[in-house]
Image: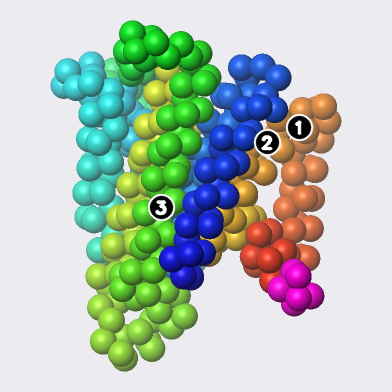
């Protein structure tokens, strides 16, 4: 990927973010857009881990849970502003990823998947069982970030949906910029060498354990920040944010859009966030149709939607 291609991707993403509100018939769509951007941010973290470094994780929702509950617990117990709680959650997630990543990243294939799954389940169980601290399965309220009054004082009158749409879009753009820069860096090239062959990478002097751990920590921070944004925009959080199904959704979004592509991952997040909204008319058949769509994509577009479509256009000389 060249520098020009990087800026083209960021430009496409920015133009879409700016253009979409013109087609929103109500404030509800701002909320849906913000949710898409939050999901896309967590999925970009998996692009770094799976797409760049070739390591699988089925427990990354655990880091999203850490970030979400940091925004709920830190203001209450530590007196931190919710915005600072986002940084605290990211720091705790990075430290946790550093500690557990060293032993579990020695595993490969489905052993690694099961190990990361165990971490996610453990976090979810702690959040569900520590009722006195987290509210248990009923969840807990998250303090308001308090920036909208400041914006009103500056003459910017925005609704809650509009505010979180803009905030999530800006954070996603920053996350995409970091991931694309990482792709071009020496660290990114080393991570992608691991994806091809760990043995070959080790032969040319790449510290395999170090770069696998770096990818794991970076992806954990992405998931944590996404979890924090989700908690702050909803004003309420439950242990479901750290549940197994959320981890599966994150991986599915990455694979659907194209696990090696930042734009593809964003597309995958958009599709899987929007489909349940569209398929509500099918009531009990919603999950069936969603699964059928996924099967078709994996059969006919195995690289993911965006990379497969791009490759076919290039093959036709378009």
Q: Is residue 274 above or below residue 74?
A: below
Q: Is residue 280 above or below residue 28?
A: below
Q: CA distance from mark 1 to mark 2?
A: 6 Å
**Picture coordinates of residue 117 (x, y %)?**
44, 52
Q: CA distance from mark 3 to mark 1?
A: 30 Å
- Answer yes or no: do the residues labelled 3 and 1 have beta carbons within 8 Å? no
Residue 245: which quarter of the image? top right
Of 60 and 107, nearer the camera is: 60
Q: Which residue position is annotated with label 1?
A: 278
As helix, strand or loop, the secondary structure at mark 2 comes to helix
Q: Which residue position is annotated with label 3?
A: 177
Q: Is residue 245 above or below residue 148?
A: below
Residue located 58% across and 31% down the image: 33
Q: Is residue 131 above or below residue 86?
A: above
- Quadrant (top left/top right/bottom left/bottom right) for the C terminus: bottom right
- Give yes or no for residue 314 being in the magenta stretch: yes
Marks 3, 1: nearer the viewer: 3
- What residue occupies the far bottom of the structure in this picture? 203
**Picture coordinates of residue 108 (x, y %)?**
42, 71
Q: Which residue position is annotated with label 2?
A: 274
Range covered by the magenta-colored residues: 313-318
Residue located 46% across and 70% down the image: 2
Marks 3, 2: nearer the viewer: 3
Residue located 36% across and 63% down the image: 182
The residue carrying pointer 3 sits among few (fewer than 14), some (14 to 19) or many (20 or more) residues within 10 Å by Cα, namely some
Residue 149: which quarter of the image? top left
The residue carrying pointer 2 sits among few (fewer than 14), some (14 to 19) or many (20 or more) residues within 10 Å by Cα, namely some
- Give yes or no for residue 130 being in the magenta stretch: no
Count of marks overlaid on the render: 3
């Amino acid at each position: 990927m060249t520098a020009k291609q990087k800026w083209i991707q960021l430009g496409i993403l920015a133009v879409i973010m700016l253009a979409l509100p013109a087609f929103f018939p109500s404030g509800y769509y701002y909320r849906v857009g913000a949710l898409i951007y939050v999901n896309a941010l967590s999925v970009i973290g998996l692009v770094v881990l799976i797409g760049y470094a070739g390591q699988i994780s089925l427990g990354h929702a655990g880091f999203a849970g850490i970030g979400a509950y940091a925004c709920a617990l830190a203001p209450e117990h530590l007196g931190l502003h919710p915005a600072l709680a986002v940084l605290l959650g990211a720091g705790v997630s990075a430290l946790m990823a550093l500690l557990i990543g060293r032993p579990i990243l020695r595993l490969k294939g489905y052993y690694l998947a099961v190990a990361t799954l165990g971490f996610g389940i453990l976090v979810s169980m702690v959040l569900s069982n520590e009722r006195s601290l987290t509210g248990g399965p009923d969840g807990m309220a998250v303090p308001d970030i308090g920036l909208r009054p400041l914006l009103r004082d500056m003459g910017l009158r925005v609704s809650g949906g509009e505010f979180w749409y803009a905030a999530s879009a800006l954070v996603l753009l920053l996350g995409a910029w970091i991931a694309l820069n990482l792709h071009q860096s020496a660290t990114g090239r080393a991570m992608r060498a691991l994806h091809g062959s760990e043995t070959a990478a080790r032969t040319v002097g790449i510290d395999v354990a170090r770069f696998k751990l770096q990818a794991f920590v970076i992806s954990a921070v992405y998931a944590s920040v996404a979890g924090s944004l989700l908690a702050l925009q909803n004003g309420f959080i439950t242990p479901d944010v750290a549940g197994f199904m959320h981890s599966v959704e994150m991986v599915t979004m990455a694979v659907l859009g194209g696990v090696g592509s930042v734009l593809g991952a964003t597309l995958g997040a958009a599709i899987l966030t929007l489909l349940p909204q569209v398929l509500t008319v099918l009531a009990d058949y919603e999950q069936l149709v969603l699964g059928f769509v996924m099967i078709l994509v994996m059969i006919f577009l195995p690289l993911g939607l965006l990379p497969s479509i791009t490759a076919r256009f290039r093959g036709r000389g378009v």
